[in-house]
Amino acid sequence: MKEKKQSRLIVQKSNELISAQYRLPLVQQRLLLLLISQIEPKKTITSEDWFYVDVQLYAEVFDLDINGAYKAVGRAVHDLAEQWALIEDTDGQRTEVRWIGAKRYLKRSGRVGVKFYSDMIPYISDLHGRFTQYELRHIAQMKSNWGISFYEMLSRWRNKSMQYFSLEALREKFLLQDKYAQWRDFKRYVIEYAMTDLNTPKSEFDVRWEPVYGGNKVIGINVFYTPKQHVLEEKKRIEEEKRSAIKATQNAVKKPRQQRSESDTSEVEHKPEWMEYGYLTHAEWLDALRISKTIDFDVTNYQEYKMARLKYDRTDTKAKKGQKSLF
DNA sequence: ATCCGAGAATCCAGTCGAGC
DNA sequence: GCTCGACTGGATTCTCGGAT
């Protein structure tokens, strides 16, 4: 029951927000993600909408003592109101944005509520295109905010198996310009904690890392990651379920209209998801799923698929041309 | 509200390797 | 061999989350 409840909690953030610079203590980070997971992915929210989290749910998701959770959440929601993120838009414009605009602590019902700050809303709701999503349970066992942030950065590029992070960029991202001046401390308190978190059993990836030297100085790290076996198996199962659902729907569509009873409204209620996204044929939808493994785009957005298709064709042609000279 | 303990942060001395 | 900068091990102090 507990597991089932947690498995439905999906966090969606725009890629600009994933790359944003901020430093949130663990409790605030957890609470914020739990609040974001309450937003329905395709729904547009406003700065007037309240979002609530039960302290009990917080304790369950992160496997904490309920009594400690009341105090921690109460304090976290208070402190969260003072926190901000430095977000760089696609045009290079950097803006400091507060996370929340208003907060409530409903003592009797054991809930906290927030209104997200209006400038933050475009980065967490009604996301079409450049966004990253993941299940909250994958970060539930993590004990450091660095682990969660690294996990988000790796999740952004799930189709890759290695990412390079320069130390300078990491210091900037985590607002650590004046902290952990020595590589040893940075490694001990940021990187090693993060990597330990990323390798927790519930996490999505198996991760290892290596320092990258510029002369005798460490200038960055390479992080190698692969999905855990149980994640691959689950993904396969979900895809099979989706395929059989699409097949069932197609059979229903083929069924002659006159043969159906008046009460049979399945065509209206169970229109294939790819039709809802604007795809003209099922083949196009399958093609979108295929190329989304190579190019990062939102498969639920037909216009993005068309752009990605063009990009894919170009890179494919380049790769074929370049093959001889490369090898 | 207070206390306790774990984790975070800082510092110092020693080691290592590159350059001269 | 000397110097310098970067890194490491470990001790100590500080901070904060969680328990009572």
Image: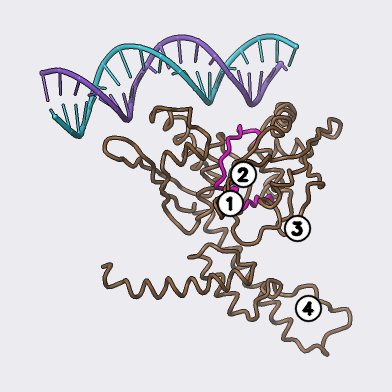
Chain colours: A brown, B cyan, C purple
Q: Residue at x 53, y 49 (%)?
A: A204
Q: Earlier in the sequence, mark 1 or mark 4?
A: 1
Compute the Cα span from label 3 to label 1. Answer: 22 Å
Q: Quadrant of the rendered structure where residue B13 is? A: top left
- Inspect this view and state whether residue A63 appears: no
Q: Earlier in the sequence, mark 3 or mark 4?
A: 3
Q: Is residue A60 left or right of residue A48?
A: left
* Residue in the foreground of this view, choosing between A267 and A296: A296
Compute the Cα span from label 1 to label 4. Answer: 41 Å
Q: What secondary structure is marked by label 4?
A: helix
Chain for disc number 4: A
Compute the Cα span from label 1 to label 2. Answer: 8 Å
Q: Residues within 10 Å of mark 2 (few under 14, many from 20)?
A: some
Amino acid type shown at disc 1: Asp
Residue that mark 3 sits on: A43
Callout 1 touching callout 2 (CB < 8 Å): yes
Amino acid type shown at disc 2: Thr
Residue that mark 4 sits on: A267
Q: What secondary structure is marked by label 1?
A: loop
- Inspect this view and state whether residue A316 appears: yes
Establish whether labels 1 and 4 are both on one chain.
yes
Establish whether labels 3 and 1 are both on one chain.
yes
Residue that mark 1 sits on: A89
Q: Pinpoint residue A119: horizontal percent, then vertical percent.
A: 70, 47
Q: Earlier in the sequence, mark 1 or mark 2?
A: 1
Amino acid type shown at disc 4: Glu
Is residue A200 a member of the stretch shown in magenta? no
